[in-house]
Amino acid sequence: MTTHTTTPLLFISHGAPTFAIEPGKLGPQLNALGSELGDVRAVLVVSPHWQTRGVAVSTTAAPETIYDFGGFSSRLYDLTYPAAGAPDVALEAVKLLLEAGFQTEVDSRRGLDHGAWVPLYHLLPQAQIPVFQVSLPYDLNTQTALQLGRALAPLRAQGVLIVASGSMTHNLREFRGGATQPASYVLEFSNWVRSAVLAHAVGPMLQYRSEAPHAERAHPTEEHFLPLLVAMGAQLEGETARLIDGGVEYGMLSMDSFVWGQPQAATTLQ
């Protein structure tokens, strides 16, 4: 097997499906980062839009673009993300997950949900790198999310880019299409998480539900936040996170994202 230098790791706030056609502040930064990734064998995406009993890994050879949303612009249904799948690499992920004690199955039909293809549409717009997904178990919590990331981390040394796709904040009950100013709770929660991630404060992050301000309002359910714990689990010893400041969309969707293992020139830092 070919040995690669360690491939970067990302947590991307994918926001609403409209992020695909409304790149805002984050989209150009992802595009710049993607242009500097170098030799990437495959992309592994963990998305909150694929939840299963146990863990499932997609081994689809040619995954279709899944439009798992409604009520948005019809323009979104004209977009496709025609990346090839990565069945061989996916089976390597299955082996690691089984060795780590996760109940794991393969899915040979699964396409790319919008938690995968929407951020990749900006990060790798040419869809030139094979992509596969690893699901989130329904019963995942902060501790097991961290363990899931640790189980997948060895793939980074084999040229696999791990993308944990979620949202820094995700309370769609407060979605306001015309909002221009960030809600104060969104800023307070996001600032707390920024500080914790940049300091690699794993303990507080594991207890974010009780320690972070407005955590339950920012995330009425946890599936969009847990991918960040997966990313933290997949970081390497001595590796530090850097912030990609994505701004706030619709007043309530913080688009803050993080990158590990990428040269500083690739992102706009705050």
Image: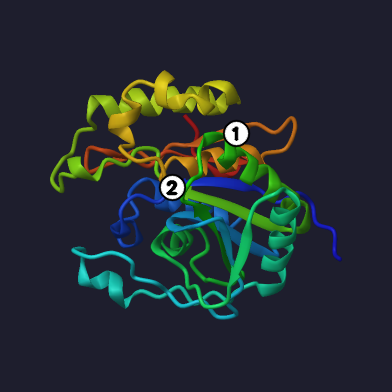
Give the residue type that dot 1 points to. Answer: Ala
Instruction: Identify the mark at residue 42; answer none if there is no mark.
Output: none
Q: Residues within 10 Å of mark 1 (few under 14, many from 20)?
A: many
Residue 241 can be seen in this image: yes
Give the CA distance from mark 1 to mark 2.
16 Å
Is 249 placed left or right of 113 in the picture? left
Q: Nearer the viewer's eye, disc 1 or disc 2?
A: 2
Q: Residue at x 31, y 24 (%)?
A: 214
Q: Where does residue 22 sit, x and y in percent of width and height?
A: 30, 57
Residue 37 can be seen in this image: no
First in sequence: mark 1 or mark 2? 2
Q: Please identify the quarter of the rendering in which residue 186 is found.
A: top left
**Frontmost residue, 179 versus 66:** 66
Q: Quadrant of the N terminus?
A: bottom right
Q: Where does residue 56 sit, x and y in percent of width and height?
A: 57, 62
Tell me whether circle 1 and circle 2 mark residues in contact (CB < 8 Å): no
Q: Residue at x 46, y 78 (%)?
A: 64
47, above or below 249, in the image: below
Judged from the image, the secondary structure of the residue bearing numbered disc 2 is strand
Judged from the image, the secondary structure of the residue bearing numbered disc 1 is strand
Which residue position is annotated with label 1?
241
Give the residue type that dot 2 points to. Answer: Gly
84, above or below 192, in the image: below
Instruction: Identify the mark at residue 166; answer none if there is no mark.
Output: 2
**Frontmost residue, 149 versus 143:** 143
Q: Where does residue 112 sit, x and y in percent of width and height?
A: 47, 68
Q: Where does residue 253 sit, x and y in percent of width and height?
A: 30, 41
